Amino acid sequence: MLRLLQNIGQLATCPADNPQDDAGLVNDAALLIEYGQVAWAGPRDQLPDLPGDIATHDCDGALVVPGLIDCHTHLCFGGWRGDEFALRLAGASYQEIAAQGGGILSTVRHTRETRSEDLEDKARHILDDMLALGVTTVEAKSGYGLDLEQELRQLEIYRKLDAEHVIDVVPTVLGAHALPPEFADNRDAYVDMLCLELLPEVAERGLARFCDAFVEQGAFTLEEGRRVLQTARELGLGLKLHADQLSDGGGAALAAELGAVSAEHLEYADADAMDDLARAGTVAVSLPLASMYLREPYIPARQLMTHGVRVAVATDFNPGSAPSFHLPLALTLACINQRMTPEEALMGATAIAARALSAEGHIGSLTEGCQADLAVLDAMDLNHWLYHFRANACREVFKAGWPQALSPAAHDLP
């Protein structure tokens, strides 16, 4: 079946191999979809001859962009942590809150106590609202179970959501997120469990595409992170790494050394590590919502790009340090606080985010042969969309060429 999107005021094609500052913008454009893929995209006056019975869709002068890709979230969790928001505003640091039993371990307690049905329902509602913002692919990490059964439970929920929800859910195992209290006096035993039990089980059952680890003071050491990720690589999982978020701990260099597809956070990465990332082709994943909520420095995106590193933009959606899944807001913050241009930011949430999921050339672009995931935005052009922030400018979403019913309003989440 052929479908023609016409009367597009501006089309962002976001070719996978373009420089980050070139989102492939086309004014007065059209887009042809066939069998769920982009068959042609370009200026309307260059549209090829088409059959008379083609289905047409009038975009009414709107901005059309690839479906947004949130390549770093912690989607499945129990409870919320609004009390910590007040503590941080009163001056408590991330590390101080964690030392008092808050932070990640607080969410671990709530998640372990929450029924699977309730965790799934909560995550499903969040996906509904993300879709309404124009998001069509979401990476989702475990890491709030921190034992064999609970980590597998989170990943099973992601498998079910991926099968049933229109959004593609890309699962990542993050057992090395924090040290659970039952292993507080035996770190080695917990890392053994991850490497000898959890990761082999995840790989055998195909429950994750990637493995991540949080290398940071108060989380896991470089040596522990290296062991976990090397084990994951040997089992056929792709690698990601939470790196240099709160200090320069060498995580970025480790990500490059191991050939990780992405290094996430990087607020404190040094210039040598940036060169390492560029040589390895590792994507830097910027998380401006976390920087805003934690009042930490924003990732030096301009410096990273100067060193030749591609920079993705994601939300880090989680109940503590980034309790928002609003990816368009993250893009506006990336422009304002990370000195990224609108084209650089959009590439970071489309073509480059796809690269951070090893899916470039399949999603994240509106070029011939790519899956026709796209968002129709109520904006005259890309600059206007990211400069004129609104609760939601998304009019319509197409997934694999098909228009989707969108959530009319935010859900009241438990």
Image (cartoon, grey):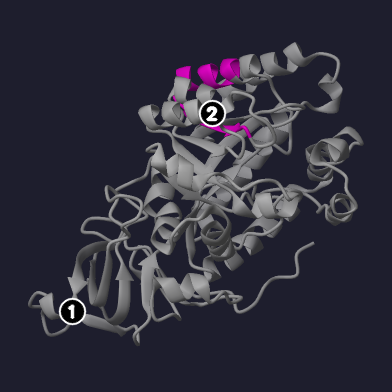
In the image, taking residue 342 as reference, residue 287 lies left or right, namely right
Drawn side of residue 235 relative to residue 219, left or right = left
User: Is residue 255 visible in the rendered structure shown here?
Assistant: no
Q: Residues within 10 Å of mark 2 (few under 14, many from 20)?
A: many
Taking the view exactly as shown, the residue that stands out farthest to the left is 49
Residue 300: horizontal and vertical position, in percent?
A: 54, 44
Identity of the residue drawn at 78% across and 44% down: 111
Q: Nearer the viewer, residue 337 or 204?
A: 337
Does 65 appear above or below 14?
Answer: below
Q: Is residue 135 above or below residue 140?
A: below
State which quadrant residue 109 falls in: top right
Q: Amino acid at mark 2?
A: Ala
Residue that numbered label 2 is attached to: 252
Q: Earlier in the sequence, mark 1 or mark 2?
A: 1
Residue 198 appears in the figure: yes
**Could you tell me how far apart the alpha carbons at marks 1 and 2 are, in whole angstroms?**
44 Å
**Residue at position x 68%, y 19% in the image:** 221
Under mark 1, the amino acid is: Arg
Q: Is residue 235 magenta?
A: yes
Circle count:
2
Image-based side of 190 in relation to 280, left or right? right
Magenta stretch, residue numbers: 226-244
399 on left or right of 166: left
Q: Secondary structure at mark 2?
A: helix
Residue nearest the observer in this picture, 163 or 283: 283
In the rendered image, the quadrant that contains the N terminus is bottom left
| Place of residue 118 in the rendered image (x, y in percent of width and height, measured from the top left) | 75, 55
Of the residues tagged 1 and 2, which is closer to the observer? 2
Name the residue tied to disc 1: 44
